[in-house]
Structure formats: structure tokens, C-alpha cells
Image (cartoon, helix red, strand yellow):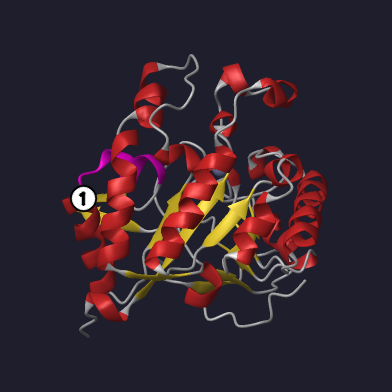
Amino acid sequence: MNHPANTIINALSFDIEDWFHMVGIDAVADPDTWPTLPSIVVEQTQWIVHTLAEADVKATFFMLGWVAERYPQLARLIADAGHELGTHSYWHRKVYDLTPEQFHEDMKRSIDIIESQSGQKVLGFRAPSFSIRPGTEWAFDVLADLGLVYDTSLFPARRGHGGYPCPPQPHVFEGAPSGRPIHELPISVMRIGPIKLPFSGGGYVRLLPGAVIRRGFSQLHKRGCPVVIYLHPRDFCPDCPRVPMPLHRRFKSYVGLGTTKRKLAMLLGRYRFDTCSSVLGITSSRAA
Ligand SMILES: [Zn+2]
């Protein structure tokens, strides 16, 4: 079947956290230090909202509860611009490091704050660092218990903090221990020979040439799959504060920061985008 690029609506998403919420970096691992660090999240999120308004595109913003609580005007700013609010947890801890009870408590706190600030019902979740992996399926029951209807955390390729084998297209996940179904919007990966390569978010967008990203779009669109773009405020911030970290992390964290704005403009000009819930066909009212 032929799927011309302009008929497929892709998902545009942003994980709203600060530069110091990077996972696994000792220098910024202690939440007690976060309020003392310079912040880029408000300024860069305002830039994202402004850019999307100019392009007349709606997106999903998965907010960290910690950020929402510290900057109480931010969720409302995003909602007032017509975007969808989702949750990215409260503390940005990896799901597989938590017990189901800890995860429930963290998620409830984030959802309560984001809903009360934005006036929207939170429908979707993205796990910090895509940290739902085989053995962590109980997380889907926590999402269902909290009234969430979709997840966009499964990463169908190998990675340091997660990776979960699943179909590449939007599907219904039925592997929760209770068997309750939940909509899943997996992260996009392209194939280059035997290699599965993520191309549509974070360090991959910063690192990969635009031509490779477009090749990924065309490959997924030929299969009828939408692409899921996921970016962070820090991806747009070349003068982000820097912290000591191992060389390979430093490269992945900072390379290509100056190219992301240009690449986002290229994507917005070339492809159609909407919120994650729209791409999944979830139409329930977003009023909280
Ligand atoms: Zn994150």
C-alpha cells in the first residue's frame, strides 16, 4: 500500500524537564541541589510554544511534576496555546528502579499538579528515559489505576536504560498483569541493514543529519506508521550549563545542540504533526 508522506499524521512531543534532569549523571542526581541550579526550562518551553504557534501545529507536552510545581504558570501556558498535557512523572526516576507503590505515588502527585494547573485531564505518560522494560509491565496497571489511557514509553530497540520488543506501529498493549488494555505509541526506529536505529528524538535528532531523519520518516511512512518526535527544552539550548560526565555521555548530551532548531523547522515544514492522543485516535474530552 502506498502512503504518501503528507497523508500520515505524525506525533510531536516534548518532555518538559530541565537540563539537570538527565538520567545517570552523578553531578546532578540529588534533587536537593536542583533548586540551586540555573534553569532553562521556562525560556526554552516558551520558545517551543511560540514556534508551534507560528507553524499552527499542536503537540503533546509530557511535563515533569517537579517542573510544574516549581513553575506554576508553565502548564497553563502550554494548555492555553491548545496543546495536550501529559505526565513525565514527578521526580524523573526510572520506572524499573521503583516499586509499583512508589511509582503510583510519584505519578499521582504529578497528575494532580498538572491537571489542577492546566485544567486538562491527563491521558498519557512517557517514562523517564523510556524505562519500561520486560519485567516492568506492572507499570501499565498503575497507569490504568490512575485513569491514564495511553503510554508512549516503549522503545523497540536496544538502549542503556530500557528497550522493549513491541510492534512498531500504534497498538493496544495487553501485557499488563491485570490484562487491562492500554493504547501504546511506541518510539520510532528505522532499519539500516540489521541495525534498528532510533532517529526521531533527543540526541538522535541532534546527532543525525537531516537526510537520515527524512529517510526514517519515509521508511516508516511506507509501512503506514506515524513517526513520534520527542525533544526536550535542553535540545534547543546550545549554551546549556555543562556538568562533569563520562566522554560518551558528554558527546551524546551536547553534540548538535545548535542544529535542533533548524531541524525542527525542517520537520514542521515538511510533515504533518498532531498530539499523541490525536494520532492514537483518542477523542475523550480533555477537560479535567
Ligand atoms: Zn526525561
- The image shows residue 230 at horizontal and vertical percentages of 45, 53
- The image shows residue 186 at horizontal and vertical percentages of 47, 62
- Write the residue at 68% across / 42% down: 67
**Residue 204 is a magenta residue:** yes
- Write the residue at 21% across / 59% down: 214
- The image shows residue 47 at horizontal and vertical percentages of 47, 48
Q: What is the quadrant of the N terminus in the image?
A: bottom left
Query: Which SS does the magenta portion mostly show?
Result: helix
Which quarter is ligand 1 in?
top right
- The image shows residue 284 at horizontal and vertical percentages of 66, 82
Q: Quadrant location of residue 187?
A: bottom left
- Which residue in the structure is indicated by mark 1? 210
- Identify residue type, mark 1: Gly
- The reply to whether the residue tagged 1 has its Cβ within 8 angstroms of ligand 1 is no
Residue positioned most to the bottom? 1
Left or right: 173 in relation to 13? right
Left or right: 193 in relation to 234? left
SS category of the residue bearing label 1: helix
Part of the protein shown in magenta: 202-209
Instruction: Answer whether residue 166 is visible to the viewer in this image.
Output: no
- Write the residue at 42% across / 56% down: 51
Instruction: Answer whether residue 268 is visible to the viewer in this image.
Output: yes
Is 257 or 139 nearer to us in this picture? 257
Q: Residues within 10 Å of mark 1 (few under 14, many from 20)?
A: some
